[in-house]
Every structure is written in C-alpha cells, then in structure tokens.
Image (spheres, rainbow, N blue to C red):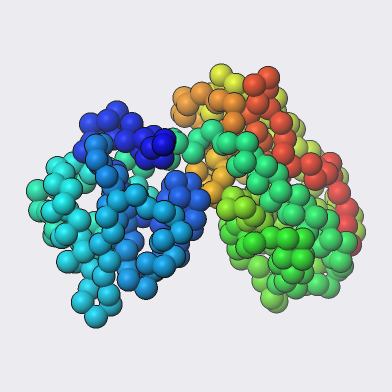
Amino acid sequence: MSDRFEPLRSIARQESLDAIALVPGANFAHLFNKEFHESERPLMVLIPVEGEPSAVVPNLELSSFDDVSFEGDVFDWRDQTGYQSAFNALMQQQNIRTLGVEGQVMRVFVEQALRKSMPSLQIIDAQQAIASLRLCKTAADINAIRQAITISETALANTIDQVQTGMTEKAIESILIQQLFAAGAEDFAFPPIVAASTNSAQPHAHSRADYQLQAGDALLIDFGARAGGVCADITRTFFIKHCADAHAQIYNTVLAANEAGHAASRPGATAHEVDDAATLVLESSAYSARIKHKTGHGLGRDIHEDPYIMRGNSERLRSGMVFTIEPGLYELSEFGVRIEDDVLITDGGSESLTRFEKSLTIIG
C-alpha cells in the first residue's frame, strides 16, 4: 500500500525537520480530500519523517474524521476538559524536536498549545515547502477548475443580461450570487466584487447599496465559483450604455497587458517574466501612474496561492501550474479597469481556461 504521507515526509527530510503539522485548510484538504471547518476547536495532524502519524481531534468531530481513514493514533478532547491534554499526549508519543508548520494557516493558540506541551520544540515556518506539493495540479484538479470557471462564466453572462442604469452595485451582486448557485456553485471562492464608477478604482472594493449606475460608468465584476473544492477567479470590466474614447484607450491598454502576459506564459519562463511582460505594457503607456498591483497569483484550493506572478519571483513555470493574469489600471477620482483570466501551463505553452469575451463590451 502506498504511503499517502510520503510527499510530506520527503518535504520534512529536505527541510531537516522531524515532522510536519497540518491544520484544516487547503493542504489538509489536498491530503485527505475532505474539508473541515476551522473553529475555536483545534484539529491538527502531525506527520513524522518515520513512523505513524498522530492527530488531535475534537471529540465532536470524531465521526467526520473517521471519513479520512486515518492511519495513526487519534487524541480526542472535549469542550469540558480542553485540548491541552490531547496535545500533551500527542507530543509525548512523537517525541520530536523540530516541527514544520503552515505559517500562513496555523493559528497562534495552536502553536502555543504545541509549545506548552514541549517547551524545547522548534517550530519552523515551512509554508512554501508544504504548499509546493500543490503547485502542479492533477488532471482531477484541472477538470474541477474548468468546471468552476464554466459555472462562473454562465453566472456572469446571465447577470450582465439583467444590468440596467439605475441599478445599485448591491442589486447586481445579489443577482450574481443567485446565478452562481443556479449554475451549480458549491460556494463562492470569495465575496464577489461589484463596483461601478469611482468605486471600480478600489481593487478590493465593497459593493454599495446607495449608488445607482449611470450611462458611461465602468462596471468591474471580480468573482469566482468554488466547485469540487477548487476556485475560479475572473474579472471583467464593462461600460454602461456607452464608453468615452478616453476610457476606451485605458481599457485597451489593460487588454494589451493581459494579452502580453498570456504570450509570456510557457513552461520554463519565470513568474517574473510574465509579470514583466504585462507590466511593461502598462508602464510604457500614458497611464503608468495608475498601476497598483502585480500581475497575478496561483489558483487552486486557495484563491491566492503559489506561484505569485510578480517581478522578482524567479520560480520557473511548469506544466500543470494554474495562475491568474489580471493587470489593471486605477484612478481613484475616475474609475478602474481590470481584466483577469485563469491560465494553465501546458507541455507546449499555456491555455486560457477562461473564455469569457474580453474585448470592450457595452452593456445595459
């Protein structure tokens, strides 16, 4: 029987660690193909370089944890007695000295419980090494991402068909959410961004209930479905009724940057090179002062994960990597434009998994 923990054991060896700990999140779900809700009750799995793994599990989660067919000892605990004794028992059994953890995921109170159970324990942030196991997607992952994108694009098409002047951002957001679930989403990948006019210049805007769309407004929609445990992430910027020539020039500059990022995406290229190709288009335009962010980020079980498509990142792209290309230009007193695609690196180049129209589109 194959050891499903061997990839993590190998990471521990490479990083000179005695063990790796996982808590609920993307890496946990990738390993066990099951998601657990993160709450005030700690749940943790510890995988040593050699020997059986162990787990700390809330007693009320035991029946759910049975579904993962865990191979090692489980130390459960109840609300009435607290979790520290379970951590003490686990650490006494494992007797390790160095432990790699997910620095972006593990919460402080879990780390404190580990330190209390073994004061001499060295806890090391191994986030990047652990997450590297998810860098190249499996065929099943890619199929799930395709499905999440299909759901998202169906929902977007059905939403913009209903957009009219006088509608609020909140009203459009409500339609979009309804359409996502109607199309088959399990959840949304993140709270959707629906932003018009000056609000579209906020890269992480919140939809307003007190602004009504007017002719000539830019309408930026950034959202994605979650399906099969993975995320889609799409942004399109539309114009309501008409688009001023000056605004069209800005839009087409962002579109050219998006296409330059696509052209640079291939096996062996670096994340730096993709960002550089897209950003140079923006920097060489008359709108360089409107650049606010990098070109993209990895996509999968997490909405933002490695590889990060940014200057200075020398990581080379490999077949199976999925990431976004999402250049944008923003002026707080006017409007913003962002065009975001989800891209798969293939053996021979790259494929845009998003197919929704990108040319300047007038709606409403």
> Left or right: 154 with respect to 118?
right
Q: Is residue 336 left or right of residue 68?
A: right
Seen at 65% across and 33% down, the residue is: 344
Point 41% across, 67% down: residue: 63
* Residue nearer the viewer, 74 or 139: 74
Relative to 244, residue 279 above or below: above
Judged left or right of residue 168, residue 82 is: left
Q: Position of residue 155 (x, y in %)?
A: 78, 59
Place residue 39 in its image quadrant. bottom left
Q: Quadrant of the N terminus?
A: top left
Question: On the rendered image, what quadrant is the C terminus found in?
Answer: bottom right
**Which residue occupies the foreground of this view, 338 or 105?**
105
- Residue drawn at x 79%, y 38% is 252
> Residue 34 at what x, y percent from top left?
49, 55
Using the image as rendered, state which of residue 277 and residue 322 is in the foreground: 322
Which residue of the protein is positioned furthest toward the bottom in this rendering?
80
Percent from the top left, x then y, of residue 46?
Answer: 28, 49
Query: x and y percent of residue 139 in the render?
Result: 63, 36
Asked if one can make out residue 198 in the rendered structure from this viewpoint, the answer is: no
Viewer can see residue 182 = yes
How many numbered discs? 0
Which residue is more in the foreground, 350 or 194?
A: 350
Residue at image coords 23%, 44%: 99
Farthest-out residue, left: 120
Residue 133, placed above or below residue 151: above
Q: Quadrant of the rendered structure where residue 156 is?
A: bottom right
